[in-house]
Image: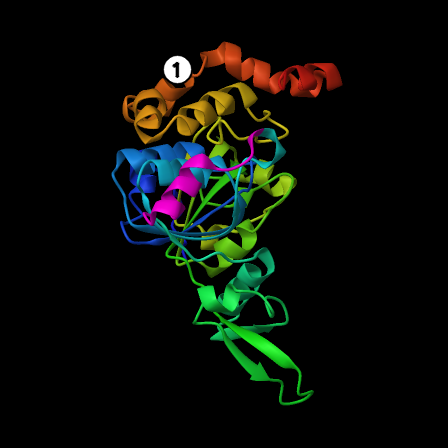
Amino acid sequence: MYTQADKRCPLTRLVAHIQSGDCLAIGGGLSWREPMAALRELIRQNIKDLKLVGSAHGIDVDLLCGAGSVATSAESYVGFEQDFGMAINYRRACETGAVKVEDNCCYTLVQQLRAAIQGLPFMPIRSVQGTDFLKLHPEFKTMACPFTGEQLVLVPALKPDVALIHAHYADEHGNLHIEGPLVADIFFAKAAKKVIATVEALIPHHELANKGVTIPYFYVTALCEVPYGAHPTSCYPRYAYDREHTKLYYQAAKNGTDNFRDNYLNPFVYDCKDHASYLNLIGGQKKLIRLEQWKDGIDQWMQLYE
């Protein structure tokens, strides 16, 4: 339990809570509310050998794989959906053996987190039987239910070392408010040993209380105010997904490891000393204002995807 009155800190110190070799749970999902600013800082700090756990993810996991930060992936899905397709860096890292694949499924992950939250060593499930998940996960066991005789799979509790979350609002004490789909973020926050968060805006406690507390302060270790910290993923209702930048990213990854390093990692991660430098590089206020204009109407929203 974390009860300090003021949990604010710079992004560099926030990310330093993550150590090489940690099991890291990344909040958000697909192209929605992923903690991208913190992940770029993680790469700059040369944090390596991570085990990533999560549900359905995209550019966040792909970026870490492209930077060589990942040892093991226990994600249920990594890709760019119908827009761009396969996650190129992720696929390359898995196929070459640079990243060990421990694929999971969303429901199994949730049950493992629930076991940790409830202080149980395992949780029974019916799913994954008849699949190769049991071969990928020798730690999964089977048993006959003592009450019904039904065959069940037992999955061990999962307690990530760190959960990294991007939220819409927080107060300085660490209460977080998230708007829209929560994905697995609440499960991550309750199960992880540490929770660190970037937020779009810090607001007074009374304002946050009026909005509603999604994740209470006592789960949160530290936080940092990072406006547009999910870019290039979306953070509705504040801003839309940046398809133009994601296309640039995808083309760099598609053209090989060296091209990705030279045309994406170097300019957008290593050569940006901080998040403000990154925002200037991707187009500054002009780009950010455009991403916020999705709310002006369907036509403005659709223009972002042309």
The colour mode here is: rainbow
Would you place residue 117 above or below residue 39 in this image?
Answer: below
Q: Position of residue 74 (x, y in %)?
A: 45, 55
Q: Which SS type dominates the magenta stretch?
A: helix
Instruction: Work out whether residue 10 can be spotted.
Output: no
Question: Dot 1 corresponds to which residue?
Answer: 281
Span highlighted in magenta in the image? 84-98
Would you place residue 98 above or below residue 133 in this image?
Answer: above
Image quadrant where residue 142 sits:
bottom right
Indicate yes or no whether the magenta region holds residue 96. Answer: yes
What residue is at 29 percent from the left and 39 percent from the top? 13
Indicate yes or no whether the magenta region holds residue 136. Answer: no
What residue is at 54 percent from the left and 56 percent from the top? 187
As shown in the figure, which amino acid type bears the numbered disc 1? Answer: Leu
Question: Dividing the image into 4 quarters, which one contains the N terminus?
Answer: bottom left
Q: Position of residue 274 (x, y in %)?
A: 32, 25
Q: Position of residue 235 (x, y in %)?
A: 57, 31
Query: Counting other residues with Cα less than 10 Å from the Cα at mark 1, is it few (<14), some (14-19), or many (20 or more)?
Result: few
Q: Position of residue 159 (x, y in %)?
A: 43, 62
Q: Nearer the viewer, residue 267 or 42?
A: 267
Instruction: Work out whether residue 26 can be spotted.
Output: yes
Q: Nearer the viewer, residue 184 or 143?
A: 143
- View extreme (right): residue: 298
